[in-house]
Image (tube, grey):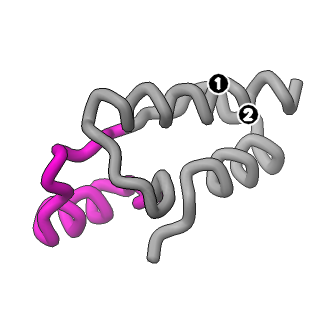
Amino acid sequence: KAPTLLEKVQTDLRSADILDVTLMVGPEGGWTPNEITDAISADCEVVSLGCAILRSVTASITALSLVTATRELLK
């Protein structure tokens, strides 16, 4: 139900001069409802990498690659 990371990064990097992006990758079992609520309360934005189920190690590399590639394209 959450927007994809790619959509969010493309929108945010186009509309603002964002220098830092912090990524928090959940465990392989997924975030618990309480963890999601706590993250939202701490002003984190929940995004998705899509419908693929990735291991934590692969998800972090994928997320970083999406952010880096988007930054390069928008320069």
The residue that label 1 is drawn on is 68
Q: Residue at x 74, y 54 (%)?
A: 11
Picture quarter containing residue 55? Answer: top left
For label 1, the crowd category at 10 Å Cα-Cα, with few meaning under 14, some 14 to 19 and many 20 or more, is few
Residue 15, position in %: x, y? 80, 50
Residue 38 versus residue 64: which sits nearer the camera? 64
Measured in 3D between alpha carbons, the distance from the residue under mark 2 to the one under mark 1, in whole angstroms, is: 5 Å
Mark 1 residue type:
Thr
Q: Main secondary structure of the magenta part?
A: loop
Tag 2 and tag 1, C-beta contact below 8 Å: yes
Q: Nearer the viewer, residue 63 or 13?
A: 63
Q: Residue at x 38, y 37 (%)?
A: 59
Which mark, residue 70?
Answer: 2
Residue kind at label 2, given as amino acid type: Thr
Mark 2 crowd level (few <14, some 14–19, many ≥20, 10 Å Cα): some
Q: Is residue 63 above or below residue 5?
A: above
Figure check: 64 above or below 46: above
Q: Is residue 26 magenta?
A: yes
Q: How many badges with numbers are in the image?
A: 2
- Quarter-wise, where is residue 14 in the image? top right
In the rendered view, tell whether residue 51 sits above or below residue 62: below
Quadrant where the C terminus is found in the figure: top right
| Segment tinted magenta in the rendering | 24-47
**Which of 30/42 is in front?**
30
Taking the image as shown, residue 53 lies to the left or right of residue 13, namely: left
